[in-house]
Image (cartoon, rainbow, N blue to C red):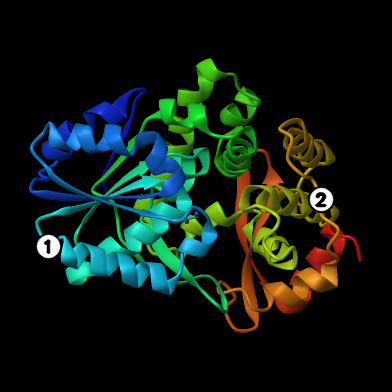
Amino acid sequence: MSETVLRRGALNELGGLMRGIGCMGKAALISDVNVAGLFMSRAKEALRCEGFEVFTHAVPAGESSKSLSRYGELLGFLAESGLTRSDTVVALGGGVVGDLAGFAAATYLRGIRLVQVPTSLLACVDSSVGGKTGVDLEQGKNLAGAFWQPALTLIDPDLLRSLPAEIYRDGLAEIVKYAAIRDRALFDLLPYDLGEEEEVIRRCVDIKRELVSRDERDRGERQLLNFGHSFGHAFEKLSGYSLSHGRAVAAGMCAMARASYALGLCSAEDASSLIGMVHVLGLPTETPYTAEEVYGCVLSDKKRQGERMTLITFHGIGDCRLTCCSMDELRQALRLGLPV
Ligand code: GLY
């Protein structure tokens, strides 16, 4: 598996760390306009002082940049900059930049080296690790993509200090997810203070790396990372994407905790601890969408397998499981977890 460095101030070591894993020559530093204003020149300097020839490109901030047209533009930029197979794409940004630049790295010249430098909490704990890359299609999110492991993920928690509180909060939902699926001790650290942030991120990254090392292609165990996501993706879609990913996942985990309790899979105490924590962290525990509305959306989920689908059920803090269910069972779970 690829290397992960998690250290305060690590952005200044970007060039040295890349040389340490064998990168050299050209580096295409890809960001969005917001992040570029904050960190592009530091990242560029960290690369130049280690002898890299640096080319920079910034896309507009926001999900709309995860498009086929921006992807095409980015491939054109890599070609015009003359990157070859021995060069490197560096994704400096949140999930959008990581997914877009990662997909360009996965496909340009049939694949060149990728380094992820996440600048949002969500990207630090989730999207920059594990090699999922891609763009959205008009028909839905993340419908085109590739598994392409970064050669290095460099996580510098100091970069999170300039994040707006609302964006930071979004990443907390993914942290609750890791605690819920695998790590009761992590749950007990929540809500954490700044001194514990590095430890919290490390635990999340360790869980993700362990699951990905066993199931890179998302055929089995890795799907545990989708806890709260099937319902969450439906909430995002039903809100016309005005509900952020983290908030939608938070409400999705709570709906699944309610359904799991009603099905006798977890105790009332564990379900309310999870829902209570989501609330304490300032994330939504429910949405106005009904079971039938969500069912309609889940029918078009790319993770559906014909007439069956894998749900991630909640059995207690630190214990989620893959449960294969029929569409009728899914409908029942939705009725138990959501308003009818
Ligand atoms: N974000 C879930 C995964 O990487 O599998």
Relative height, residue 198 to residue 22 (above, below): above
Question: On screen, 67 above or below 283?
Answer: below
Instruction: Note whether residue 145 is visible.
Output: no
Q: Which residue lies furthest to the top in this view?
A: 195
Front residue (pair 238, 330): 238
* Closer to the camera in the image, 72 or 315: 72
Q: Identify which amino acid the numbered label 1 is placed on.
A: Gly
Q: Which amino acid does label 2 sit on?
A: Glu
Q: In this view, does 156 lie to the left or right of 285?
A: left
Residue 17 shows in the view: yes
Q: Which of 147 and 328 is in front in this view?
A: 147
Q: Is residue 313 left or right of residue 205?
A: right
CA gap between label 2 and label 1 equals 49 Å
Residue 148, given in percent of the width and then of the height, sits at 30, 60
Residue sitting at the far bottom: 306
The residue depicted at 55 percent of the width and 77 percent of the height is 138
The secondary element bearing badge 1 is classed as loop
Q: Residue at horizontal 81%, vertical 50%?
A: 286
Which residue appears at 73% of the width and 33% of the height?
277
Q: Mark 1 near ligand 1 (CB under 8 Å)?
A: no
Residue 51 placement (x, y as % from top left): 8, 37
x, y (%) of residue 281?
71, 32
**Quadrant, the C terminus:** bottom right
Q: Residue 318: horizontal and vertical position, in percent?
A: 61, 39
Q: Which mark is on residue 82?
A: 1
23 vs 155: above or below: below
Reading the image, the residue beneath label 2 is: 286
Q: Which mark is residue 229?
A: none
**In the rendered view, does 320 fall on the left or right side of 29?**
right
Q: Could you classify mark 2 by the number of other residues whose Cα lies within 10 Å: few (under 14), some (14-19), or many (20 or more)? A: many
Q: Look at the numbered disc 2 and give the secondary structure of its residue.
A: loop
Q: CB at mark 2 closer than 8 A to ligand 1?
A: no
